[in-house]
Image (cartoon, rainbow, N blue to C red):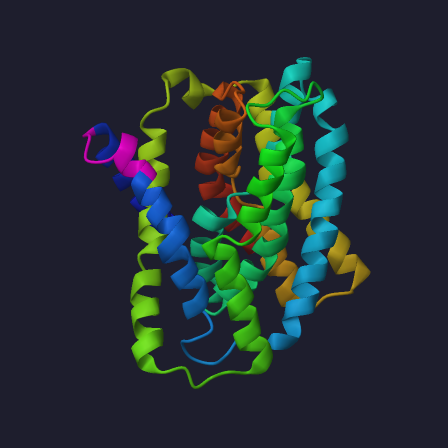
Amino acid sequence: MMTLFAIVVVGYLAGKLEYMGGSFDKRLSKLVIDITCPALILSSAMTGDLPDRRLILPLLLISTITYIILAVVAIFLPRYITKKKTDEGVIGFALMFGNVGFMGYPVVASIFGHEAIFYAAVLNVVNTFAVFTIGTMLVVGDNGESLQTEEHRSRFQKKVLYSTPMLAAYITMLIVALGIDNIPSAISQPLTMIGNITVPAALLIIGSSMSNLPLRALLGNATVFITSLLRLAILPVGIHYLFVELGWFSPLVVNINTLVIAMPVATYGTILCLRHGKDTSLITEVTFVTTILSMITIPLLVTLLF
């Protein structure tokens, strides 16, 4: 985590010194999401031994159950965290969704090895579907105000399900399920090299985005810290022990699922707020605070639970 944090700091400094920021960050984010991250996912099944295909269905099942639980929490708990009705949806989004794509993959790879990126990608299939369905409803709120029509929003959701990261996850699951292990190096090596860009680029982007936040966002408030405590510690620990007690899944499946949902708040929250004309101040603050605190909470969770 210190290694990852060091790259975030470099990104922060690069943003402050104007090497990064603005349109550069947007274009780099698009490159990471559309090209390098899919390559990283594909390469997870092309280097060394194939991941265990028997874990695909358990991973999809545990992720589905997890997000059903988190959806219930996201709908009912925020009203006890804030007195502002307009903030409930944003808090619910923050409680439900972690930053799997930008933080989850690097952390999972650093703890469980490169092949575990495949397992995180399988978990992220359910996460991505939920972000652009339940997550959108949480951000839009009860009043239903949106900058898009219902028809436009529906098309957007379908597009996300067939975005390049999702397609990469589907293809990788197929490779593992069919036991295809003779992929030519002319394909696997370039994908691996491109995929290796993902971790440092994603962390640099996170650091650069932090450099644009006002001082007030660094300080936080009671609502932000309560939300952060729930997102980073209470919910992951509670769900971890729930699945341990149920005994339905192997320790590896439970541990990777726990680590994925212990990530800081997903950057998609800010994107959705912007897309639907919502105030971004609260989601930006809680994203920043959880990202910083996760440098402490993730190592603690790994040490105490795994």
Query: Left or right of 54: which side holds 194?
Result: left
Quadrant where the C terminus lies? bottom right
Image point (43%, 86%), residue name:
182
Q: Nearer the viewer, residue 161 or 72?
A: 161
Q: Would residue 21 be counted in the magenta stretch? A: yes
Location of residue 146 (image quadrant): top right
The image shows residue 293, relative to residue 171, as above or below, that is: above
**Picture coordinates of residue 241 (x, y %)?**
73, 53
Location of residue 132 (image quadrant): top right
| Residue 174 appears in the figure | yes
Q: Residue furthest front?
A: 151
**Picture coordinates of residue 68 (x, y %)?**
75, 46
Q: Residue furthest right?
A: 246
Q: How many marks on residues? A: 0
The image shows residue 71, relative to residue 169, as above or below, that is: above
Location of residue 91 (image quadrant): top right
Q: Would residue 254 be counted in the magenta stretch? A: no
The image shows residue 290, relative to residue 130, as above or below, that is: above
**Picture coordinates of residue 176 (x, y %)?**
55, 76
Q: Which of 94 and 130 is in front in this view?
A: 130
Query: Left or right of 213: which side holds 52?
Result: right
**Picture coordinates of residue 140 (x, y %)?**
63, 25
The span picked out in magenta is 17-26
The image shows residue 272, relative to residue 303, as above or below, that is: above
Image point (56%, 73%), residue name:
174
Q: Nearer the viewer, residue 234 or 300?
A: 234
Q: Residue furthest bottom?
A: 182
